[in-house]
């Protein structure tokens, strides 16, 4: 890797590891909200319009706080966007009228074009966590510095992500109910399982932001060849 590439990468002017190289790049302000949750959980992010949908899918997962041990997909207008490595469907298992596309051949800007546009994001097909992602604002793209790499940044949010494998919306509601009822026979079990410090209202933007930065930084370094000589 030459010095020019390193300089560009660390000055956050190279976005090609996560994005399609296009001339007309815009900053999209998007909001992801967990559907039907007993406690409101949302994140607001800024992402370049040229980011691949496959990378955004991972970024949304980390921004919300999911562990990442389950399949996920983005769906808009009966088109399902998935990584080739996550593809779990064939034509016989799709809902009537649905098709599947490679999420690394489409960009966020192709799905979200004007304020109010939205798509669905699902994490863990067992617990079936449904999210709505909505475009709030389109801004002119400007280079901005991120600690861990170019691409996405969390700018606002609220609520703690539910624990993985809690049993979906109804399981999470039960967890919250039991953890606030010392007389419940499952009180101690739920506290051990979720952690004594678990608070559904907790939100620390830096904690979630570092998850997003780590994904972008690690992926960018791998693509740019940082680990070839290890």
Image: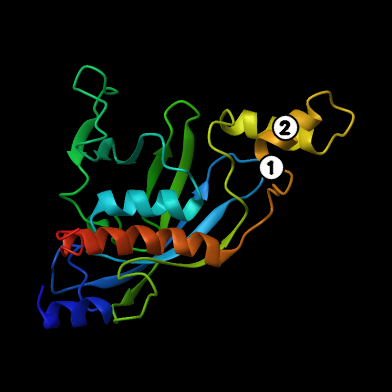
Answer yes or no: is residue 12 visible: no
In the displayed structure, 141 sits above or below 172; it is below
Q: Residue 158 appears at what percent x and percent y?
A: 61, 58
Q: Residue at the location (29% across, 81% down)?
A: 143
Q: How far apart are marks 2 and 1 (CA)?
A: 8 Å
For the N terminus, the image quarter is bottom left
Residue at x-position 28% and y-position 53%:
55
Callout 2 crowding tier (Cα within 10 Å): few <14, some 14–19, many ≥20:
some
Residue 90 coordinates in the image, percent (x, y): 20, 23
User: Which is nearer the eye, 167 or 49?
Assistant: 167
**Residue 139 higher or lower than 81, as above or below:** below
Q: Name the residue under label 1.
A: 195
Disc 2 secondary structure class:
helix
Residue 107 drawn at (x, y percent): 22, 56
Circle 1: element type: loop
Quadrant of res 9: bottom left
Most distant residue in the front direction:
230
Residue 19 lies left or right of residue 185; in this view the side is left
Q: Which residue lies furthest to the left in this view?
A: 2
Image spot of residue 119 (x, y percent): 36, 47
Mark 2 sits on what residue? 190
Instruction: Specify which label sits upstream in the sequence, 2 or 1.
Output: 2
């Amino acid at each position: 890797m030459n010095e020019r590439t390193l300089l560009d990468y660390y000055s956050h002017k190279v976005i090609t590891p996560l994005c399609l190289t296009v001339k007309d790049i815009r900053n999209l302000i998007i909001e992801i909200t967990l559907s039907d949750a007993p406690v409101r959980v949302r994140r607001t992010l800024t992402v370049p319009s040229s980011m691949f949908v496959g990378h955004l899918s991972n970024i949304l997962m980390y921004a919300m706080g999911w562990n990442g041990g389950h399949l996920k997909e983005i769906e808009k207008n009966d088109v399902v966007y998935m990584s080739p490595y996550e593809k779990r469907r064939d034509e016989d298992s799709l809902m009537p009228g649905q098709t599947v596309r490679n999420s690394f051949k489409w960009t966020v800007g192709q799905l979200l074009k004007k304020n109010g546009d939205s798509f669905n994001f699902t994490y863990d097909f067992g617990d079936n966590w449904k999210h709505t992602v909505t475009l709030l604002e389109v801004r002119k793209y400007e280079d901005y510095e991120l600690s861990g790499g170019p691409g996405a940044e969390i700018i606002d949010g609220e609520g703690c992500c539910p624990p993985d494998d809690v049993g979906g919306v109804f399981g999470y509601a039960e967890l919250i109910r039991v953890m606030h009822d010392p007389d419940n026979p499952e009180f101690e079990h739920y506290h051990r399982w979720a952690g004594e410090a678990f608070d559904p209202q907790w939100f620390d933007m830096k904690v979630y932001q570092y998850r997003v930065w780590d994904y972008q930084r690690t992926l960018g370094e791998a693509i740019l060849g940082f680990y070839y000589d290890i």
